[in-house]
Amino acid sequence: MKHLPTSTARWAKVLLLLSFAMTALAQNHAFVQGQVLDETGRPIAYVNVQITGTIDGAITDRDGRFAFSTQHMGKCDLSASFIGYETAHKTLHLSQGDTTTVRLILRLALIQLDETIVTGSTYTTGEDETVTLSPLDVVTTPGASADIFRAFKTFPGVATVDDGAGLFVRGGDVSETVILLGQATVVHPYKYESPTGGVFGTISPFMVQGTVFSTGGFPARYGNALSAVLSMETQNMPVQKSYTLNLGLAAGSLGLNLPLVSDKLGVRFTGNLSFTDLLFRINRHSSTFTTTPRGHDGNLNLIYQYSPTGRLKFFSFNASDRLGVRVTEPSFDGIYKGSTNSALHNLEWTDVFAHWVMQTSASLNHHTARKQLGNLDFSPRDLTLKLRTDIERALTASGFLRLGGEIEHMDNRLRGSIPQGDIFDPQADIFELDTSYGARRAGAYFEIDFEPAHRIVVNLGTRADHHNLGNRFAIDPRVSARYQFTKHTDARLAWGIYHQFPDPSKYNATSGNPRLRPQRAQHRIIGLHHERDQFMMRLEAYHKPYYNLVLDHPDLNLSNDGKGHASGLDLFLKRGDFLSTRFSGWMAYSLLRSRRLQVRHIGSEMHYEEAPSPYDITHNLTLVAKMRLIDDLSGGLTVKYATSRPITPIVGAVPVADQNYYLPIEGRIGSERLPSFRQVDGQLSYLLPFGANHQIIFYLAINNLFNRANVLDYDYSIDYSQRQPRTTTFRRSIYFGATVTLNP
Amino acid sequence: MQYILLALIVSLIILTQKGYAVAQQSTDGQNPDQPTVKSDEPAQPAADLLTSGKNILQQGINENNLDTMYAARATFERALTDKSLSVWSHYYIALTDYRIANNLLAQGKKNKDQASKHLKEAAEHLEEATREDITREDAKTIAAEVYALLSSVYGRQISLSGIKGMFLGPKSGNLLKKAGQLAPDNPRVALTAAISAFNTPKMWGGSKERALEGFQRAAYLFSQEKPTDPIHPVWGHSETYTWLGIAYMDRDEEDSAREAFEKALEIDPDNGWVKYDLLPKVKKEN
């Protein structure tokens, strides 16, 4: 028995050691168990519950329960993730041997935070899922002539003022819509420019990857725009070699997409030649053109992806056009000759630096024109240089912070011979004009996207701009919010201040006013958005008061006394996608009331009157329908109806002493309206594949199917005693052509 | 007395340990689909998750059981933590999403939204995988598998929304080309290319002839495939014969079609698509 104690002691020692070791092993683990539920308290099965940064975890069972052990101790993060839900997190404090019980609630994931969704009144094109229109939808819109601007004219909030491409948004003038390409401002976005914009947009839809078109309530990153913004992104790296050749009745074009070094370097090029002679002849339009509109343009896009995150993009665009037309005005009759050359070069650099996505660009717009009529020979030229930087980062809690700044330098020169008196009198005194002026605008902004509560997304931002002429600052606070009350339906609100500086030419001391202030508008928007499968509905109401608008002034030439407001309702219904569904199309209806303080000329006197704005189109309805008729044959129709615009009738005239012309006496401003605008356009296209990868698309478009002579304005006789309607030059016309695409 | 005490202590300790073991087993045993948590063996845990996830996914496909596929997805998601294998985790999450989307779509059009969500997730995971820096010696094989699957996912997205064909079509074709260059004899790459050729409309470069040849070649390549790494994908052998059968059906060659379907079932007796849908069709028509 004497030994026993020792051996017992030894055993005890061994066992004690053993037990320590084993307890240590058991206590080396912590246990986590619990349940994962959705917001309504229902369990969710197959949720991955895991300690972040480790592979320790488990999958929930049918009752949403899980249990697992881990060797990870102390403070750690437990996450629960399941597709369609936002990942939930919980901080745990684990200690050896303990069992921690947790309950995790998963919230239904909302559509990804995206500014185009936060902001109401925004329509997009591109390849994303959230876009309103795909690029193919744009180019196949009947009547749009494959033009981005014309396609957007079928959207709510855009008024049909005439049959051109000008974007008149929510009672505003065409100059209140700013056009951007990447970060560059497109100073001259229209071809064959006119006071209502122009006939076409300058940017080819095939050079554009995606667009964001906002008819109001847009965020702080967009500056110097009173009413609307159309922002276009240039194409990315081509993934495949392809060649496109298009030949139509009035245009020919060639396109090349070449990936030079796979995923590193790519080039895209398009060249277009337009000639309308044949078009007018075939359609037997007794045109007033002495030189039918013709032009050519070239686009070059070079993309260099120098690292997985870094990219340089160079975009260059150069377009020329010219035309000659017989002009019959009250006081003269002659030939107007016009030619323009527009170029835009943009170098853009994108990269990621420590969580910040940076985009910087330098752009140069160059525009020259020559306008000749009788003794008048006038050549404006402008040069705009713009530098812009935007940086953006994700915030810890789902949100974004965006900052940016820009400097825009405009340099204008006007040269020419301006006759003093009769424009066609060879004896008339000629005033030789040569004047230059410049302007610089600098702006900066910040924006935050955040979720103050579940299902609510807010975009909050402010921008500040300074203009050197007039030396004025403008501060624009803006906020927009979206509340998603069901998976498919959300409500949107937006409010903001918007400033736009007057055109630099308006600051000159002789005919303008050097002390002009920026024009201001306030946007208030409330909207409802519903989207389900192939169906989309948007309803928006807005009120937009205007202040400090530039207005003619008897003593100061120009003043900021203009004011007004626009209110209305926009409805958009859309179903299907072109090619994906047999039928597709959309309907846009806008109701508008827009009034402004305007000048009424009675002889040489000026009177001010509050009256309907020149673009107060009360009802504006557009229907676009497309259908796949048989396999590869598709057809479409666009129907447009618009209450036509208010005009100011001329009720009399007073002769000017010693001159053979008259000064008109205007009736009440906007007291008459032109006849309503109605137009139906049709289009057919047929796809013919050949070879392994190639195809030909034949197309036939009939614009203004019913040959309606829409009235654009009235022309008056020299003494204003008689008037006759001036109707559209775009009567029924047939256009056809073919596009060949080769993918070698 | 001390012995009794010792015995008590020992048995207590053993019991406690066993108890834990039992407890742990019961946790793991709740669902046979669920992988076991082997925290004690940290050597290959993510790899284990991947191989067990593969089995769960295969089971889900065979049983046509969405729940099981979701369990597989969660398993792969857990393996994402291990950076050295995350390219495979992304790959398998995407593969599962792709299978789930196909399953949802087979059930009817009303699931289109849900299916699109899975396809979008699949594309994102694969795009993530393509960005991973793979320095392993089998980098080429991995990249080829990822490209081929991404090409299929794009193809499926195009089938849901034709408009995407404009952008995703060339992307999809390009990926297939790259996959073919990296691993010309990978049977899944060959299968994907053949499916793409079969489903792509002629005007976008599809060809049923080329598809049939492709399926035959894929079938041969599968017969030669000898998987070495348990993580590498092995799916597609039975599916190749399924598609071969479909291609024959398209040509009204029913005997060949039946033969192909039978071969598909021989490789995978649980191939539900063939068993319940395709084979009865050729049998009925006869």
Image: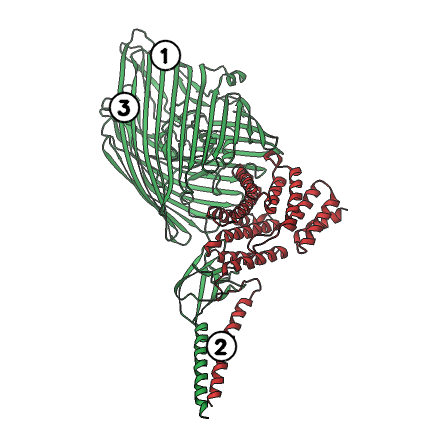
Chain colours: A green, B red
Chain letter for mark 2: B
Q: Are marks 3 and 1 in contact (CB under 8 Å)?
A: no
Would you say residue A701 is visible in this rendering?
A: yes
Determine whether the residue tagged by mark 2 lies in a helix, strand or loop.
Answer: helix
Residue B154: x, y in percent? 54, 43
Chain letter for mark 3: A
**What is the crowding at mark 1: few (fewer than 14 residues within 10 Å), some, or many (at least 20)?**
some
Which residue position is annotated with label 2? Answer: B16
Which residue position is annotated with label 1? Answer: A332
Which residue position is annotated with label 3? Answer: A606
Determine whether the residue tagged by mark 1 lies in a helix, strand or loop.
Answer: loop
Labels 3, 1: one chain: yes
| Alpha-carbon span between mark 3 and mark 1 | 25 Å
| Residue type, numbered disc 1 | Phe
Nearer-N-terminus badge (3/1): 1
Q: Is residue A534 left or right of residue A546?
A: right
| Residue type, numbered disc 3 | Met
Chain letter for mark 1: A
Residue B7: x, y in percent? 49, 84
| Residue type, numbered disc 2 | Thr
